[in-house]
Amino acid sequence: MIIVAVFTILLSAFGCLGAVFKNRVFLYLYAAILSLLIITELAAFIITLTYRVRIRDSYYLGFRELFIEIYSNNHTDLKYIIEDIEREFKCCGINNVTDYYKHNYTVPVACYQDQDFDKSIFDQGCANVVIQWLWKQFPIIGSVLGSILLIEIFGIISSIALSTAISHSSYSEIYK
């Protein structure tokens, strides 16, 4: 996160300093770096779509390992996170409630409908429910990323236009 923040600050500095001091080199550098950033974002998006099955499987395996680690070593703080997920998504275990039975764990209250022991246990596993939820959020995520992409493209066009105007202004009296 710190690296991303430093990169963002440096990139913004190139754009701002180039605009304030009418420095064409900084503006072109800003446009070039922003172009590389857009290409990287598009590549990451394409790779994510291409390897979504592998990403899903990796998430599933990681969730399973985390589940076993939390319950086998009795990490109570992390148990609350799992229980919050179960409560929020109305799911139980990784695949279903049998995950608790297989490892001789106590089924948490969060797995019961309305947190009532007399009611039935949620039959869906949390791994698939969370993946389905993420997939349903995909249009929102895509819209946000698309908006960011448009803003970045506008930044490139603006910096090139300003840089061109600055180069032409050296031949005219407009910016005196």
Image (cartoon, helix red, strand yellow):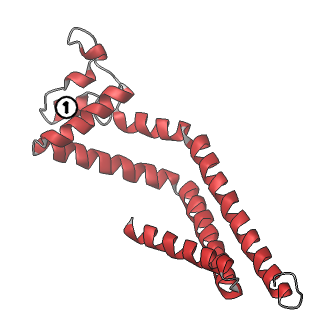
Residue 21, above or below 146:
below
From the top left corner, tell me how far across and down residue 66 is, in percent: 24, 47
Callout 1: SS: helix
**Residue 118 appears anywhere in the view:** yes
Q: Residue at x 10, y 46 (%)?
A: 73
Residue 35 sits in quarter: bottom right
Q: Residue furthest front?
A: 176
- Residue 53 in the image: above or below residue 90: below
Q: Looking at this view, is 26 or 3 the one in front?
A: 26
Q: Three-letter amino acid code at disc 1?
A: Tyr
Q: Which residue is mark 1?
A: 100
Which sits in the foreground, 172 or 15? 172
Q: Quadrant of residue 149?
A: bottom right
Q: Position of residue 2 (x, y in %)?
A: 38, 68
The vertical placement of 160 against 92, above or below, is: below
Q: Residue at the spot x=72%, y=74% of the render?
A: 159
Q: In the picture, residue 101 is in which quadrant?
A: top left
- Measuring 34% from the left and 23% from the top, which residue is drawn there? 123
Most extreme residue toward the bottom is: 171
Work out whether residue 91 can be spotted: no
Residue at left offset 68%, top offset 76% = 19
